Amino acid sequence: MSLHKRRKIRTFALLFCIITFTTFLFSYTFGDPSLYFKHAFRLSDSFLSKGLCACHQCMMEQDEDPWFAEHFNQSVHPLMTRENSVLSDETFKWWQWLQSESQPANFSEVVEELFQVVPDEVLYVDASPERCRTCAVVGNSGNLKGTHYGPLIDSMDFIIRMNQAPTSGFEEDVGTRTTHHVMYPESATDLDNTTILVLIPFKILDLQWIISALTTGTIKYTYVPVPPRIKANRDKVLIYNPTFFKYVYESWLEGHGRYPSTGFLSLLFAIHICDEVNVFGFGADRNGNWHHYWEKNHLAGAFRHTGVHDGDHEYNVTLLLADKHKIQMFRGR
Ligand code: C5P
């Protein structure tokens, strides 16, 4: 039996005795003995009822942290489906402003075409007291080097990587398995047949690109050259929901930076679909260098001062989530 469970039972036993004694005294003094049983049973019910997941600590706890509860909105689903693809005017305008297009295609027509190529499924809504879905969100920081986190990362149910992230040659520190790879056209990389590709669309052309990259290969350029084709299983392609994207920016970043980084978007994706979130490869290394684990050059500040993302603010929110035991941070070296 875990220490946590033993503590829970001990606290329960103590509380049970106190309540039994005081309620018994109260009810006999004021004449309603049935009160005693009511209190005792309500208490045992709430204590012995199953948690919201089967992990040691669940993302959704009953005794919710007020700060977390204020920011978290379970009703916004991280993934786009045909059904939730109709965006509000406000969301559509915000989303189109991210990387404005001179001649955008018709959004709903593109979405219709998209879901003829990739699956239109409602996924990850299967939370239950029996489920303990552990997740690793693996950022690309150079602080992963020399950590030997590989086996720990590989032990998780979901392993979420992003952008150019390689594993080959870095297995000891970053692991070998990838269940989800988050990317956008300009950061795309080939995947194996089992990995789920999570596309973050910043514009309509990005949705057209994934259709093209999985079929005809006609789109070769967005604002930079992009891979005309991508190796990926088209039955395992998911689309990050623009409404969720805006929610992450407004609710979690409170408008800091121009838009959230891939890492922060991946983190919130995990927070919404996992019971336990473990974060690796975020932040600078011990010398303050802000680089990728596969790069030799240590470009201090390269990520933080781009102006597009507010890396410091994102990192502070991430640390706050860790302080509140919502996620576990593995800070690396
Ligand atoms: O650089 P890139 O965007 O590919 O990295 C993916 C994510 O990893 C970033 O969005 C950021 O959240 C995280 N990262 C970091 N520190 C670094 C490099 C990346 O936190 N030095």
Image (cartoon, rainbow, N blue to C red):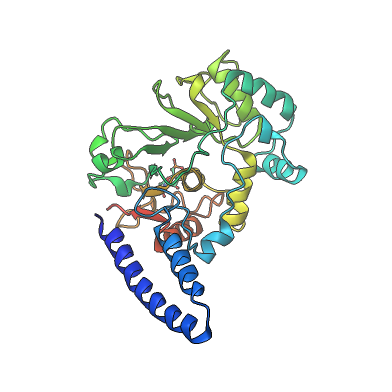
Residue 172 in percent (x, y) is at: 23, 38
Q: Is residue 226 left or right of residue 243?
A: left
Residue 18 percent across, percent down from the top left: 37, 78
Residue placed most toward the observer, 298 or 318: 318
Residue 227 seen in render: yes
Q: Quadrant of the N terminus?
A: bottom left
Comparing 179 with 83, the one in front is 83
Q: Can you give x and y, in whole percent of width and height, for residue 129 in the image?
A: 43, 47
Q: Is residue 24 left or right of residue 85?
A: left
Most extreme residue toward the bottom is 29
Residue 133 higher or lower than 18, as above or below:
above
Residue at 66% in and 29% down? 82
- Asked if 161 appears above or below 207 in the picture, the reply is below
Asked if one can make out residue 299 in the rendered structure from this viewpoint, the answer is no
Residue in the picture at 29% in, 52% down: 332
User: Would residue 14 be found to the left or right of residue 326 on screen?
Assistant: left
Q: Height in image: 73 above or below 197?
A: below
Could you say which quadrant of the image residue 239 lies in?
A: top right
Residue lying furthest top: 216
Residue 167 lies in quadrant: top left
**Residue 141 percent location from the top left of the image:** 36, 46
Between 5 and 270, the one lying in front of the other is: 5
- Counting every numbered tag in the picture gives 0
In-image side of 200 versus 16 (left or right): right
Residue 17, image quadrant: bottom left
Residue at the extreme right = 89
